Amino acid sequence: MHLIHLKHLKMTPPLLKLQIQRRLQVKQNPKMNQNRETVETTGRSVEEAIEVGLIQLDASRNEVEVEILDLGKTGFLGFGSAEAKVRVSRLSENASNRKGKQILDNILKMLEVEADTTVISNRNNGPDSSLIEINGEDSGLLIGRHGTTLRSLQFIVNAIISRSEGDRILIDVEEYRQRRNRILENLATRVASRVANSGRPITLEPMPANERRIIHLTLANHGKVSTSSTGINQERKVVITPTSNQRSSGNQR
């Protein structure tokens, strides 16, 4: 039998300390967590908050679904920071979520990709969609150029599920979607500034519908430019055009 002295806990990182404490409690009372289905936890990041929830539920990543309540903020030099907050629940009985996760796990196994999958309910996904997050050392291989491989993987999973289920499954890898969204928002802002200053329209490279939507929403209230889509199928792209006033001032330069 191994004994853990309290002075050792003080020297242990917060997550490991909590994990040791919870494991000791569970060992003393095995039924303690059987009736606990959901916990709300915080952390310096979403991943840390999820880990705290897993420890409290005494569950593995593949046994829970996660709802992101607050992404948190890093702040500047520690000021203005806010912790991330999540709700961690034992995996629900939602048929499409279970089926989507099972299908994705099987695909990853066939591809010999070592990664974990987690069902995440995020209010930003929309009422009829769920997100399955992929994390692991090999998960970066699943993204592809500008997310092309990731979109193909998502299409396959939804194509299989649609035979019997109606809900849409979104798939993400290491929070790639959030990073890509920020890149697109910055791109839209930079190009809009160029268009407003030059008075000439700029056409962006072809994008899938969800990425074009981000460009449109980012510039919806810009005032000096407008956006539209052109092209068909895979070649559909966004055109950022100066307003009539900006076009006139641009021609006068």
Image (cartoon, rainbow, N blue to C red):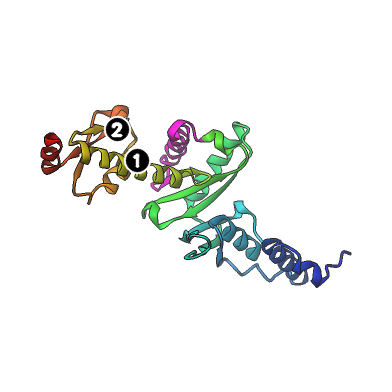
- Decide: is 156 above or below 56: above
Q: Nearer the viewer, residue 67 or 97?
A: 67
Dot 2 falls on a residue whose secondary structure is loop
Residue, x 44% and y 51% (percent of image)?
130
* Count of numbered tags: 2
What is the quadrant of residue 201 in the picture?
A: top left
User: In this orientation, does residue 170 appear?
Assistant: no
Whole-percent x and y of residue 49? 57, 61
Q: Nearer the viewer, residue 3 or 192?
A: 192
Measure how far apart labels 2 and 1 are at the Cα level.
9 Å
Q: Which mark is residue 204?
A: 2
First in residue order: circle 2 vs circle 1: 1
Whole-percent x and y of residue 102? 55, 44
Looking at the rendered structure, the kind of residue marked 2 is Leu
* For residue 131, side relative to residue 43 (left or right): left
Answer few, some or many: residues within 10 Å of disc 2's Cα (few below 14, many 20 plus, some between 14 and 19). some
Dot 1 falls on a residue whose secondary structure is helix
Q: Say which residue label 1 marks.
A: 187
- Decide: is 45 above or below 139: below
Residue, x 61% and y 53% (percent of image)?
61
Does the segment drawn in magenta span residue 144? yes
User: In this orientation, does residue 215 appear?
Assistant: yes
Residue, x 61% and y 58% (percent of image)?
51
Residue, x 64% and y 55% (percent of image)?
60
Q: Nearer the viewer, residue 83 or 30?
A: 83
First to last magenta residue range: 143-169
Whole-percent x and y of residue 23? 74, 65
Looking at the rendered structure, the kind of residue marked 1 is Leu
* For residue 96, side relative to residue 45 (left or right): left
Tell which residue pokes out farthest to the front in this image. 253
Tell which residue pokes out farthest to the right in this image. 1
Does the segment drawn in magenta span residue 171? no
